[in-house]
């Protein structure tokens, strides 16, 4: 079965973060993927992985990956191992890379952003990352403040209203969304 370009990027981003951060568990990985996608969108109008994120009580969640997590497709099983481990009084679903990272799927900008995120959060667990993913005026907070749970977090919310490039980035996003369909 052929794996899509976005799926290849998702799998390799998982491998990258598992190899380049400490204490990489499910929640930390979800937060890193969210930051990767939303920061990249704010710069270019494109996400890296193509995942759709939902606003849940404890933060942004890539719903499709969450739904697949307990029984991942073979391409994810070949790339990372998910194993429960005790971390203090918490059981973390640790993510360990079992495949090599393949950078050929990424642009230089995507690789720089992934490296920057890995460096920024290398020694963090998921808990301190909440300050970044739950920032008061951020995309998750704007959607979470609305009634209801499990609402989609629109990528457009990643771009501040005062960003002078906002309209151009959103036009680019619109153009690419037509190509993907």
Image: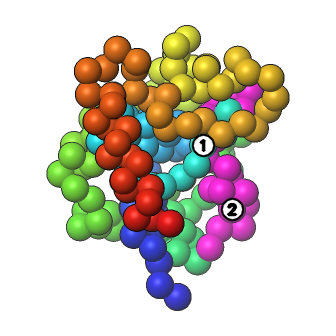
x 52%, y 75%: residue: 75
- Residue linked to disc 1: 53
Q: Is residue 14 above or below residue 143?
A: below
Helix, strand or loop status at disc 1: strand
Crowding near the residue tagged with mark 2, few <14, some 14–19, many ≥20 C-alpha atoms within 10 Å: few
x 56%, y 37%: residue: 154
Q: Quadrant of residue 67?
A: bottom right
Residue found at the far left of this picture: 108
**Where residue 39 sits in the image (x, y, percent)?**
37, 34
**Where residue 45 sits in the image (x, y, percent)?**
35, 43
Q: Which residues are magenta?
A: 56-73
Q: Is residue 108 above or below residue 123?
A: below
- Residue linked to disc 2: 68
Q: Is residue 157 magenta?
A: no
| Residue 91 appearing in the image | yes
Helix, strand or loop status at disc 2: helix
Q: Is residue 147 above or below residue 66?
A: above
Q: Nearer the viewer, residue 164 or 120?
A: 164
What whole-number distance in Å separates the C-alpha atoms at marks 2 and 1? 14 Å
């Amino acid at each position: 079965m052929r794996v899509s370009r976005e799926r290849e990027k998702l799998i390799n981003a998982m491998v990258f973060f598992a190899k380049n951060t400490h204490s990489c568990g499910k929640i930390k990985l979800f937060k890193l993927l969210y930051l990767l996608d939303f920061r990249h969108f704010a710069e270019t109008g494109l996400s890296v992985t193509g995942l759709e994120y939902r606003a849940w009580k404890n933060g942004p969640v890539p719903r499709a990956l969450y739904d697949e997590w307990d029984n991942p497709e073979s391409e994810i099983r070949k790339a990372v191992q998910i194993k429960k481990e005790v971390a203090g009084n918490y059981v973390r679903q640790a993510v360990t890379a079992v495949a090599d990272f393949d950078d050929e799927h990424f642009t230089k900008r995507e690789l720089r952003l992934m490296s920057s995120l890995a460096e920024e959060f290398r020694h963090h667990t998921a808990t301190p990352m909440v300050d970044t993913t739950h920032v008061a005026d951020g995309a998750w907070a704007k959607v979470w403040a609305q009634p209801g749970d499990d609402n989609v977090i629109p990528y457009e919310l990643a771009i501040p209203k005062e960003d002078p490039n906002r309209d151009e980035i959103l036009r680019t996003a619109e153009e690419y969304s037509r190509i993907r369909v």
